[in-house]
Amino acid sequence: MPPRIFQTSTRVRYAETDAAGIVYYNNYFVYFEVGRIEMFRELELPYEWWLPIAETHATFHASAVFDDPLEIHSFVDEIRRAGFRIGCRVHRVRPGAEPVLLAEGYTAMVSVGPDRRPIPLPEDFRRKLEAAV
């Protein structure tokens, strides 16, 4: 069964474009974060200091430009003992046109203690993540 998809929308801001007028590649990681935070909000999960990003990855398929409407799809991709991976797909969704996949990838987060060393995910947090798979 496919994971539950959490969806949020935004538009490309002028500041996110480069000299060529297209979205600078690193801003897709910001879009991944927007989707991840909205997903956490919907799942009533805290977004705390004890969840640093351990790994990121993105594959780019097409370009976006200023004011393009974007739809961000986030989902729980993997759950481990002390961490998890959130998958993400960013689409351009212009009215009257088919959505276009712009980028897809993931961010892996790890649960850490006060000493910043990995610790098991808190049980309540883990249950909420598992419910979204």
Image (cartoon, rainbow, N blue to C red):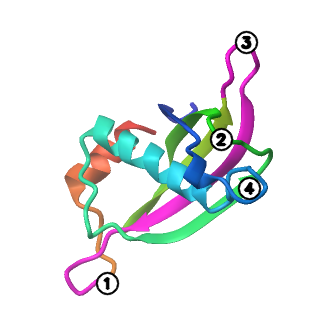
Place of residue 125 in the rendered image (x, y in percent of width and height, measured from the top left): 26, 52
Q: Name the residue under label 4.
A: 59
Q: Report which residue position mark 2 lands on.
A: 66
Examine the structure image and report whether residue 113 is included in the region drawn in magenta. yes
Residue at horizontal 51 percent and vertical 41 percent from the top: 74
For residue 117, the mark is 1
Mark 4–mark 1 CB contact (< 8 Å): no
Q: Which amino acid does label 2 sit on?
A: Phe
Which residue is found at the position 43% from the left and 65% from the top?
109
Confirm whether residue 105 shows in the render. yes
**4 vs 3, front mark:** 3
Q: Which of marks 2 and 3 is in front?
A: 2
Asked which quadrant contains residue 42, the reply is top left
Give 62 or 112, whichever is nearer the viewer.
62
Quick one: SS at disc 3?
Answer: loop
Which amino acid is tagged 3?
Gly
Which one is in front in this view, the residue at disc 2 or the one at disc 1? 2
Name above or below for residue 83 compared with residue 126: below
Residue at which label 3 appears:
96
Q: Distance between the residues labelled 4 and 2?
A: 20 Å
Q: Percent from the top left, x then y, of residue 35?
A: 46, 43
Is 9 situated above or below 22?
A: above
59 vs 40, left or right, is: right
For marks 4 and 3, give the CA distance: 26 Å
Q: Earlier in the sequence, mark 1 or mark 3?
A: 3
